[in-house]
Amino acid sequence: MVIEASGFNLLGGTLPTSATTENPTKILCLNQVVTIDELRDDNEYEEILEDMRDECAKFGDLTTIIIPRPDMEGKLIPGVGKVFLEYADTVSCSNAKNMLGGRKFGGNTVTADYYPEDKFYSADYSG
Amino acid sequence: AGDGAGRKRKSRWADDEPKPAYQLPDFMGGIEFDPEVQSLNSRLLEISRKLQSGLPLDDRPEGARSPSPEPVYDNMGIRINTREYRAREKLNRERQEIISQIIKKNPAFKPPADYRPPKLHK
């Protein structure tokens, strides 16, 4: 959406960037959702995936869910504990962001942020 | 096992919590304003004041009193069941009874430290 300021615009058409509005993307990153221990357990991982799919599909066309898992050696993997959701469009994504942010998942209060699309598509989950 | 298609496991997602409504705390317009509880409270206050005042508790004139029970003495030969003592006991019993009633109506009521809940088998 483009907002046109009426009258004089001394800045030559650039919109003021005072308010740090987040750039909406199609990717939503849920933080502090799951623990490493939960992700190590195959059954729990499947359940978490299922719960995510069921709930997050309510807000729009959910195309991908990525839940980074820890490796068996216990090395720190970027993005573990987070859940990445790809929606078909930014509207669905922003809808999900509004609805999921602050909700509780397994006792953890979830925060939801947009995630850069380029990073997501290059499988960079380092946040 | 138990992995049937119809199985409905509870989601880890907590139910969408309704936004906290701005409502008055429970004690506003609640049990405290119940007229019955109010009258119990004021009677309790009255009794407590009487017990602490040190004034004679039985101030009925001689003619209005009922006959005294047989005197009871302790082993020092001092009478135990004086008029004053009996009046105090009576007020104490009423006080405990009132507190029980308030608690029954308002479980959140904090009874005074010396309150003993009545024994059921009594």
Image (cartoon, rainbow, N blue to C red):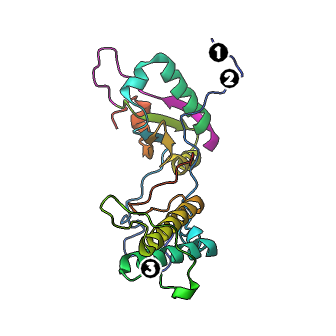
Whether residues under marks 2 and 1 lie with C-beta atoms below 8 angstroms apart, the answer is yes
Q: Which residues are magenta?
A: A57-78
Q: Give coordinates of residue A13: x percent, y percent.
A: 42, 68
Residue located at (49% from left, 43% from top): A104
Q: Please name the residue that numbered disc 2 is placed on.
A: B7
Residue A61 visible = no
Looking at the rendered structure, the kind of residue marked 1 is Gly
Between B32 and A56, the residue placed more toward the observer is B32
Between A20 and B103, the residue placed more toward the observer is B103
The disc numbered 3 marks a residue on which chain? Answer: B
The Cα atoms of the two marked residues, 2 and 1, are separated by 7 Å
Are the numbered discs 3 and 1 placed on the same chain, yes or no? Answer: yes
Mark 2 or mark 3: which is in front?
3
Are the numbered discs 2 and 1 placed on the same chain, yes or no? Answer: yes
Q: Callout 3 environment at 10 Å: few (<14), some (14 to 19), or many (20+)?
A: some
Snapshot quadrant of residue A1: bottom right
In the structure shown, which secondary structural element does the residue marked by tag 3 occupy?
A: loop
Whether residues under marks 2 and 3 lie with C-beta atoms below 8 angstroms apart, the answer is no
Mark 3 or mark 1: which is in front?
3
In this view, B85 is above or below B3: below
Q: Earlier in the sequence, mark 2 or mark 3?
A: 2
Q: Is residue A58 magenta?
A: yes
Looking at the rendered structure, the kind of residue marked 3 is Leu
Residue B57 is labelled as 3
Residue located at (53% from left, 76% from top): B43
